[in-house]
Image (spheres, rainbow, N blue to C red):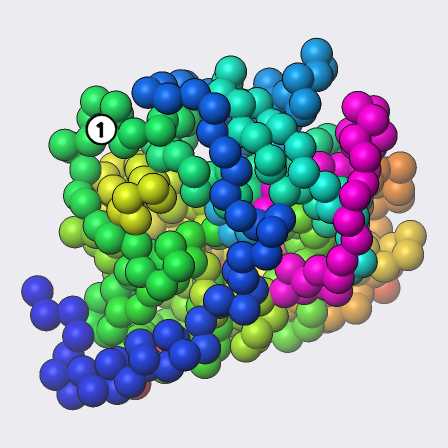
């Protein structure tokens, strides 16, 4: 199958060159805290205890400096160094040794750093550079104690799926390796992604991002030639791996996304305003909904095995709103065009009093992330009953396919 049309070969090649010149190397620059940790043990293959919390990989039973207490860390391939919350650092008496300015692409912060030892499933990683800061760990992570970053992740190989997580210093210790397609990492551990009837690019694998694929707007015209579009108005917030972030304002449905040899049909692609997340584009943790993946960083390889070839169609059907918390009020922050919410007269800025008979005032005692997650759960039903402050009556919203504007370029 010819994935890149002959008329767009030159344009695609020029775009790939541009990506190399404007790549994420500035964000992933290896300072002393981002350098690879040292692994004490050899010839090991460990299955980890973990949770799929809200889709993220949360690794359990992590020890810091040999502590008896165990902790829960987010597994985040998009984070250059590891992180420990201020609370945990104080609990174990971890000393802050360095302070420096740090940017994750969203926020500029003055952050304390140190080196420590972290033990995962009995395997000890020494001299791990860790940031100590509650603003990066954030309330959005709720009871997460830290982040496993690339200074640990890149030292070993990882076998990732929704059912199990394994870690080994040698990928050939994963007995199922022959069942996978072998690929080579590009440009500082990015993976190659093609779009059916369009072009291809290299994209950062970021397991701390809670979608399948997100592209910078400037990238879309070079590599996606056939799509339907869902747009809207407003500025909504939702929980990501480390913060409550502004969401994308345009969503695309494409004929297919190809990673390795397999195509995921009718895929959803999120777009980001240029430069908002510090990277060019991201493949997020939802890749595990469609592929099992082995990351062999020491040998610069990754392996994919597709287990579902059709995108979840429910992601293309929405009631049409996203919500923001503004003081003590929950308001409509984003309204999708062509949605049931738009047709029934809801507007950006409307104050919501209740959703499915849950009073919004009842969320006031929750943390910010818990409140946003609860709201998202409430509006993710096939039918959503909403009471607005401006109306005395309830309005019932139904899910509707919001991708109706065909756009072929």
Residue at 36% over, 26% down = 168
Q: Is residue 84 left or right of residue 55?
A: right
Image: magenta residue range: 81-108
- Which residue lies at the image location 60% right of the left edge and 27% below the top edge? 118
Horizontal arrangement in the rendering, residue 160 relative to residue 2 (left or right):
right
Inspect the magenta stretch and tell me whether residue 100 lies in it. Answer: yes
State yes or no: residue 89 in magenta: yes
Q: In the image, is residue 145 above or below residue 350? A: above
Q: Helix, strand, or loop for circle 1?
A: helix
Farthest-out residue, top? 68
> Which residue is at the front of the view, 268 or 159?
159
- Left or right of 7: which side holds 401? right
Left or right: residue 328 versus residue 248 is right
- Circle 1 crowding by C-alpha within 10 Å: few under 14, some 14–19, many from 20: few
Question: Residue 225: x, y in percent?
Answer: 28, 78
Residue at 40% x, 19% y is: 46
Is any part of residue 110 visible from this angle? yes
Please state the horizontal and vertical placement of residue 316, each as a whole percent of the image: 43, 57
Examine the image and state in which quarter residue 401 appears: bottom left
Q: Name the residue carrying label 1.
A: 172
């Amino acid at each position: 199958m010819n994935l890149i049309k002959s008329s767009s070969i030159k344009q695609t090649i020029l775009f790939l060159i541009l990506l190399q010149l404007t790549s994420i190397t500035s964000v992933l620059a290896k300072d002393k805290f981002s350098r690879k940790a040292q692994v004490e043990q050899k010839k090991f293959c460990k299955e980890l205890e973990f949770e799929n919390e809200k889709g993220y990989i949360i690794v359990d039973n992590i020890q810091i400096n040999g502590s008896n207490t165990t902790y829960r860390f987010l597994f985040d391939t998009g984070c250059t160094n590891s992180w420990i919350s201020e609370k945990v650092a104080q609990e174990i008496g971890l000393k802050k040794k360095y302070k420096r300015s740090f940017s994750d692409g969203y926020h500029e912060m003055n952050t304390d750093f140190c080196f420590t030892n972290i033990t995962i499933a009995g395997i000890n990683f020494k001299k791990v550079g860790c940031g100590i800061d509650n603003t990066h760990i954030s309330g959005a992570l709720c009871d997460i104690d830290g982040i496993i970053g690339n200074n640990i992740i890149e030292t070993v190989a990882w076998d990732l799926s929704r059912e199990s997580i394994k870690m080994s210093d040698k990928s050939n210790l994963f007995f199922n390796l022959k069942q996978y397609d072998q690929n080579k990492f590009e440009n500082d551990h990015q993976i190659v992604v093609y779009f059916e009837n369009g072009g291809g690019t290299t994209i950062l694998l970021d397991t701390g991002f809670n979608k399948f694929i997100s592209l910078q707007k400037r990238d879309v015209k070079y590599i996606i030639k056939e799509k339907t579009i869902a747009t809207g108005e407003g500025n909504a917030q939702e929980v990501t791996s480390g913060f409550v972030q502004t969401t994308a304002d345009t969503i695309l449905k494409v004929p297919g996304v190809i990673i390795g040899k397999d195509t995921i049909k009718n895929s959803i692609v999120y777009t980001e305003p240029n430069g908002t997340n510090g990277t060019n584009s991201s493949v997020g943790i939802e890749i595990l909904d469609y592929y099992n993946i082995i990351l062999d960083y020491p040998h610069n390889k990754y392996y994919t095995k597709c287990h579902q070839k059709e995108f979840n169609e429910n992601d293309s059907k929405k009631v049409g709103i996203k919500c923001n918390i503004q003081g003590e009020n929950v308001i409509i922050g984003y309204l999708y065009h062509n949605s049931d919410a738009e047709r029934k007269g809801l507007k950006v800025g409307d104050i919501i009093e209740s959703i499915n008979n849950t009073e919004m005032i009842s969320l006031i005692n929750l943390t910010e992330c818990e409140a946003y997650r609860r709201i998202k759960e409430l509006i993710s039903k096939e039918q959503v009953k909403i009471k607005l402050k401006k109306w005395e009556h309830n309005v019932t919203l139904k899910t509707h396919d919001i991708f109706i504007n065909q756009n072929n370029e």
